[in-house]
Structures are given as C-alpha cells and as structure tokens.
Image (cartoon, rainbow, N blue to C red):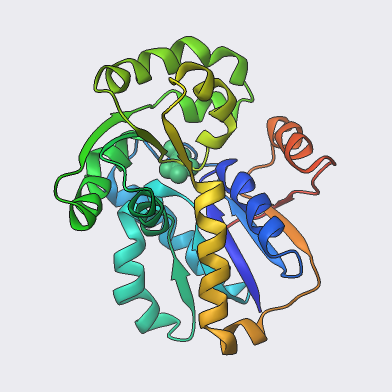
Amino acid sequence: LTIGVFDSGVGGLVMARAFRAALPAHDFLYLGDSLHVPYGPRSAETVYRLTLRAVDYLCRQDCELIVIACNTASASALRLIQQEYLPQNYPDRRVLGVIVPTIEAVAAGHYKRVGLLGTAFTVGSGVYAEELQKIDPQLKLHARAAPLLVPLAEYGALHHAQPVLEEYLAPLLEADIDSLILGCTHYPLFRPLIEKILPAGVRVISQDEAVPPKLTGYLKRHAALDARLKKNGKFRALLTDVTPSYHATGARLFGADVAFEKVAL
Ligand code: DGL
C-alpha cells in the first residue's frame, strides 16, 4: 500500500517533493489532474466531482492513505469524502487535507493579522476564515483571491508574476499583515518573488513546510497503518495529460526528468 498525493496540477509536485524529503523511505504516488486544471475558477459541484474521481482512482491504485494536496479540492470535498464517501466505499482508507495543518501552523505562530492568498474557490468558500475563528476569534483574516497565479505556474511563466503579485498583495500590505498563508499548493513556486515584496517582518506560511511534519506525526500516531505502507523510496507521477511544461517543472523541482505517466481516470 502507498501514500497517494492528489492535486489539480503542479502544486502536487511541490508537495510530493516536500513529503519525500520528510519521509524518504516511503513510496509515493502523485496524481495531477492536468487535464482539468485550474480547479480554482470552477463550480463547487465540478470541483467535488473531479476530486471524488481522483480519490476513487487512487483508492483503486492501492493507496491506503491519500493526501488531497489541493486547497480548492480540500475546501470543496474533504468533509464529504471523509464522512460519506469513504465509509460507504473504502472504509479502510484514509484521506487527509492541507487546510487544517495550515491552520495549526498559524495557531503555533500566534499571528493576529493574517493574510491569505488562495484560489477564487478557496477564498470564496470561507473555509480559512471559519477555521481561523475557531482558534482565535480576535484574529483578523485578510483574504485575497489570486486567480492568475495558477495559470502562470502551470505554464511555467513565473517570470511574469511580479506585477500580478504586487497587485494581489497591495491590500494585504495596507492591512499591515503579520503573516501570509500561501493557501494554494502552487504558490510556493512564487515564494522568492513574494518574499521580495513583503516587508521583512511578515512570516510566510507555506504548505510545503507546514504539512509534511503533520503527515509524519499522523503516521507515528497510526503505526499499524504505517507498517502496511511500502517503503522502497519509490515515486510515481501520474497526470491526466502530459505536457512539456510538466517535464520542465518536474526537472526543475526534482533535478532530473520525471517519468510522467498519462492516465485516464
Ligand atoms: N493547487 C490548488 C490549490 O491548492 C488549486 C489550483 C487550481 O486552481 O487548480 O488550491
């Protein structure tokens, strides 16, 4: 049995790389729905349907534990998958998201004026506002949808992002944020540019740093599950469409060409 990592696109590669660094012995199976990316501008019904299909596919590939490494998919589908879909279809499988681990990182930092960049869906869902209220009702969230970032990341056009980021971040800087959640798994790719724009004291909360220790902790607490997971250090990367920009991004992230396999879900 393997750990599955699902994302709408290249963000999952960023996360898979971070998970492999934290758990180098474990096997990982990444699935990117490159045929349907971006999820961010789509309707709740469509994001849910696409996410369910991907999770179902990974369950059929013998993934006992699946990380939905996509905020948009987590916001739309995680609760229903955990509470209804798995108990009815795969009661022995586990699915985790990325939003709660991120909230825990904010709680640990005791931040008060938190900025959030996310997809239109994630910001519109209000899930971050809702979860942050639970940890600290005094905390102020300044959320901004950043719809152009995912297409720029998917096309490997990071060098065009500077003016776009400046525009998205301007209202957050005006609100004098003390921290910024990169609320989309694609955004760590923009981190160097974002850090150049942010004033020195603003802390960046990035999911490629916040989530892997939580996954490690989860496996420690679930030792029987962990004992069933394959540990040959293998990494397979599946895409619903293989395009040149994935080869370029894969090579940049992993330092070698990634042998992407095209699959139909
Ligand atoms: N990477 C995904 C997330 O974390 C969404 C990207 C997309 O719009 O497909 O929200």
The spot of residue 33 in percent (x, y) is: 55, 48
How many numbered discs sit on the rendered protein?
0
Q: Nearer the viewer, residue 263 or 233?
A: 233
| 195 relative to 41 in the view: left or right | right
The spot of residue 7 in percent (x, y) is: 52, 50
Residue drawn at (40%, 48%) of the image: 71
| 34 relative to 87 in the view: left or right | right
Quadrant of the rendered image containing residue 90? bottom left
Q: Could you tell me if residue 43 is visible in this image?
A: yes
The spot of residue 127 in percent (x, y) is: 25, 50
Q: Could you tell me if residue 57 is visible in this image?
A: no
> Considering the image in quadrants, where does the C terminus appear?
bottom right
The spot of residue 42 in percent (x, y) is: 34, 39
Residue drawn at (23%, 37%) of the image: 141
**Ligand number 1: quarter of image:** top left
Above or below 5: residue 60: below
Above or below 202: residue 168: above
Q: Nearer the viewer, residue 96 or 237?
A: 96
